[in-house]
């Protein structure tokens, strides 16, 4: 989690997660562009998949947000 129970927000972990997310996105874009598919091929594929499964995606997002919220509540000792 991005919340440290002793010191508050864990900015080091947030920066690390953003760095790796950007690195993976750049790597995927580089690979697909060198294969001749265009740099946005992966993102268009993800978008098309989400459009094909909208209700399942919305349910997944809701369940994931509730799970993260309760994990955070357990970590700070409220539950």
Image (cartoon, rainbow, N blue to C red):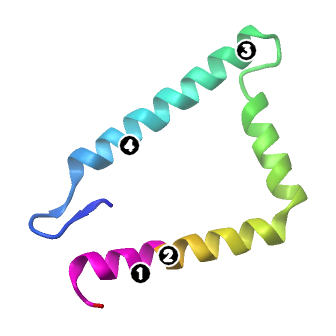
Within 10 Å of the Cα at label 1, are there few (<14), some (14-19), or many (20+) other Cα atoms? Answer: some
Where's the C terminus, which quadrant?
A: bottom left
Say which residue label 3 marks.
Answer: 33
SS state under label 1: helix
Q: How far apart are marks 1 and 3 (CA)?
A: 40 Å
User: Is residue 28 toward the left or the right of residue 4 in the image?
Assistant: right
Q: Badges 1 and 4: C-beta atoms under 8 Å apart?
A: no
* Residue at mark 4: 17
Q: How crowded is mark 3: few (under 14 residues within 10 Å), some or many (20 or more)?
A: some
Where on the picture, by quarter, is residue 46?
Answer: top right
Name above or below for residue 9 compared with residue 79.
above
Residue 16 image point, x, y percent: 32, 39
Question: 51 or 68, which lies in front?
Answer: 68
Which residue shows up at 90% across the image and 57% down it?
Answer: 52
Foreground disc of the pair 3, 2? 2
Mark 1 vs mark 2, CA separation in Å: 5 Å
Task: Please tell me which residue is depicted at 21% across the width and 55% down the height of the picture.
Answer: 10
At numbered mark 2, what does the secondary structure look like: helix, strand or loop?
A: helix
Stretch in magenta:
68-78
Q: Relative to residue 56, is residue 27 drawn left or right?
A: left
Q: Where is residue 3 in the image (x, y as percent from the top left)?
A: 25, 65
Q: Main secondary structure of the magenta part?
A: helix
As measured in the structure, the alpha-carbon distance from the residue carrying label 2 to the one carrying label 4 is 19 Å
Residue pictured at 85% horizontal, 47% vertical: 48
Say whether marks 3 and 2 touch (CB < 8 Å): no
* 37 to 65, vertically: above or below: above
Residue under label 2, please give it: 67
Q: Name the residue under label 1.
A: 70
Tell me which residue sits at (38%, 75%) in the image.
71
Which label number is shown at residue 42? none
Could you tell which of marks 3 and 2 lies nearer the N-terminus? Answer: 3
Mark earlier in primary sequence (2, 4): 4
């Amino acid at each position: 989690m991005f919340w440290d129970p002793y010191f508050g927000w864990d900015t080091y972990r947030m920066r690390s997660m953003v760095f790796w997310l950007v690195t993976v996105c750049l790597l995927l874009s580089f690979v697909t562009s060198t294969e001749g598919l265009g740099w946005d091929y992966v993102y268009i594929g993800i978008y098309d998949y989400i459009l094909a499964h909208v209700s399942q995606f919305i349910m997944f997002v809701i369940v994931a947000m509730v799970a993260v919220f309760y994990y955070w509540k357990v970590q700070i000792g409220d539950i």
